[in-house]
Image (cartoon, rainbow, N blue to C red):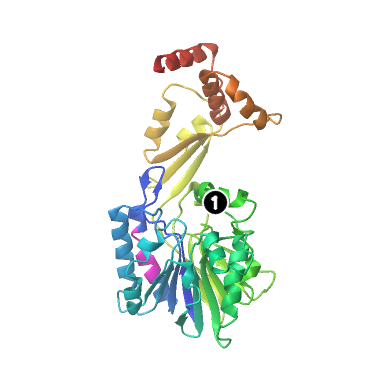
Amino acid sequence: MKILHTSDLHIGISLFGEDMLPYQESIGESLCAAADEYSADCIIIAGDVYDSAVVSGEAVKCWDRLCERLFSGGRDIPVIIIAGNHDSAPRLSVNSGLLENCGLYIRGSFRDYMKPISVGDADIYCIPWFNIAEVRELFSDREIKTCTDAFLAMTDDIKSSWDKSKKHIIVAHCFVTGAAISDSERASKGAEISAGGAQMVSADVFAGFDYIALGHLHRAQTIKCSADENTAVRYSGTPIPYSFSEAGQAKTYTVFDTEVGISELCAPSSLSLITVKGSYDEVMAAEVPEDAYVRVILTDRSSSAGLYENIRDRFPRMLRLECARKVSASADDSDSRISEMSVSEAELAEKYLRDCFGWEITERQLGWLEEAMKEEE
């Protein structure tokens, strides 16, 4: 049996204010092409269908068209979808009972984890994004402090009654320990990393299962399950890049064959993200494709008049301008934070320009800042 696995569509997302819907419209077509090429028996979308709980009407229409494509052209294979942390589970799973009759399985609540979806010789168990407190309430006889505890409670429960003659697959949306993240996830996932590991899940909780189809992280990667080398724990990654740090990553769909294992298929996209880095003169001389979105990183401390406008004219599709920060080895961020309360707003602005852009402003320019801030008062 062959499973086509993707995740984190983030329909409705914008990149520095630029709408990504025109590029997301092509996901359905490329996903269908991949399913046909590999003769997939099932399609899995492991969470974060939408970028937020409340999305625009255009985003909903985009998702609607994608679903229609999945069932077009005589394609008659089940499609399994779970809610991620960006989704509104109740909204995503509306009419899910009715849609199951058509082969579209949308699971919004983790409470259905004991209701497998049977596809060929496999039982597929769905564990959408959940709140630990809800799992703790369900398993009142177990001590559940972390996401690892919560997953272990559910996987133990599944193993206690599963059909041993079948393959066993889990679809989940979580952060597995040891996985790599990208810039597009860093802000939202940072709290999970820093919360003492409570939000992170050990891959070992999946020991005994054949395949773990994961969503949540944007880089395609396989995580080692040290407790069972036969368990394949896999993030499919996003089908298109959602940050400049992902521009160099190969965006793929994951195919899991119960007889062969994991393989990848290119997820084609017309979205091109390019970073141009160098001195002002080097940046202005750089050549990039006309349809590419550009991030510019300046490595010198040029503060010439009209700098931004000049670069913007050179790259009309520039989304971000940064300056490479040079940090002194003796800099002490904690001391900087402590002293911020005792300096003027103009001096804070001066520090910001120096730390973030490498610009040193003159006493005269500092005076202008102070005058401007007094006028605002």
Quadrant in which the C terminus is drawn: top left
- Comparing 171 with 110, the one in front is 110
Residue 165, horizontal then vertical, whole percent: 57, 88
What is the three-letter code of the residue carrying label 1? Lys
Res 268 seen here: yes
Res 151 quadrant in image? bottom right
Question: Which residue lies at the image location 48% right of the left edge and 14% below the top edge?
Answer: 370
The extreme bottom residue here reads 165
Residue 108, horizontal then vertical, whole percent: 42, 66
Question: Which residue lies at the image location 46% right of the left edge and 41% below the top edge?
Answer: 295
Vertical relation: 155 (above or below) 146: below
CA neighbours of label 1 inside 10 A, class few (<14), some (14 to 19), many (20+): some
Q: Is residue 120 magenta?
A: no
Number of labels in the image equals 1
Residue 256, horizontal then vertical, whole percent: 52, 74
Q: Which residues are magenta?
A: 25-32
Q: Main secondary structure of the magenta part?
A: helix
Res 235 seen here: no
Question: Which residue lies at the image location 40% right of the left edge and 68% below the top edge?
Answer: 31
Q: Helix or strand or loop: what does disc 1 sit on?
A: helix
- Comparing 255 with 226, the one in front is 226
The extreme front residue here reads 140
Residue 101, horizontal then vertical, whole percent: 33, 79
Q: Give the residue pinned by disc 1.
A: 189
Q: Is residue 30 magenta?
A: yes
Left or right: residue 223 compared with residue 73: right
- Comparing 170 with 278, the one in front is 170
Vertical relation: 327 (above or below) 228: above
Left or right: residue 341 compared with residue 315: right
Vertical relation: 20 (above or below) 365: below
